[in-house]
Amino acid sequence: MKLHPVEVLSREEHGRHVLLRYRWTGAAPEPGQFVMVRPERHADLDPFLPRPLFAHDYDGDTMNLLFEVRGRGTALLAGEDAGLLVSTPLGRGFEIGGGAAVALIGGGVWVSPLKLLSRHLQDAGVDHDVYLEVPGDAPEAYADFLRTRYEGATLVETGGESDPSQTVLDHVGDPARYAALYASGTAAMLGAVKRAADGVVPAHLALRERMACANGSCYGCAVPVWEAGEKTYGRTCVEGPVFEAEVLAW
């Protein structure tokens, strides 16, 4: 996997989240694709592996990445003086059809790929409603960012519920009123969307798995899937990260 040095244009902090922009004139990302990112310079190759991050938005020459600072790797990416090395867009993204309205569902703090998806749906003339969970422990700056970035979205504040994913789905209502559901979020949220859509409407789920090689060689990101009626494994970095809900053997 080749990593390319890029010009970092800006970094914005929104609570624990960072919106990072860099110049990119290579292959355009499809909604749901990801890139591998690492600091250009870091001591002792620590961390050794680059981080997989969804393409958040792209306008023709500027790529946006949205991520939460959770450890040393993401903290280095958020550093003001850090140059970046990035891959081309990787993986299999969301499939976009025409016709009736669809719903975009974001769980927890993992809404990143839905912005680029929303842009493509708008360009394709597909009506879509957006439902985003705002966890009770999320900083207000993050909620303000979502209100600005996803204009018109339904923000569902959760906190203390035994099943926050169901709280979000209650706002979505009957899935049958949509032609498809597109979701990115916690494992609990993706599981809830899969169950709600089962036998009712197609659902497309963006998975987050730990990735090392990002080319399918190591099988470190494999997830259980159904293939010809048999349970096997699919590589999130190649066959995903977006899977049809019915394919996942959860």
Image: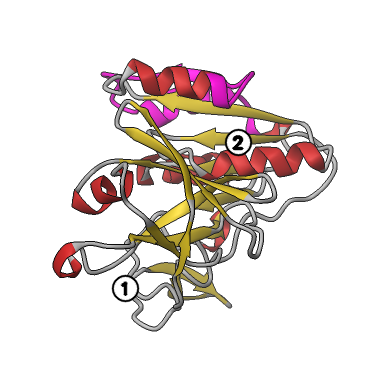
The foreground one among 164 and 4 is: 4
Residue 220 shows which numbered tag? 1
| Magenta region, residue range | 148-175
Earlier residue among tags 2 and 1: 2
> Which kind of residue does numbered mark 1 sit on?
Gly
Does 85 sit left or right of 172 as displayed?
left
Residue at x 43%, y 53% (from the top left corner):
53
Where does label 2 land, which residue?
Answer: 104
Residue at x 42%, y 72% (from the top left corner):
214
- Please say if the residues under marks 2 and 1 sit with CB atoms less than 8 Å apart: no
Q: Quadrant of residue 93?
A: bottom right
Q: Secondary structure at mark 1?
A: loop
Of all residues shown, which one is farthest toward the left?
44
Q: Is residue 18 above or below residue 35?
A: above
Residue at x 20%, y 47% (from the top left corner):
71
Residue at x 39%, y 83% (from the top left corner):
217
Q: Secondary structure at mark 2?
A: strand
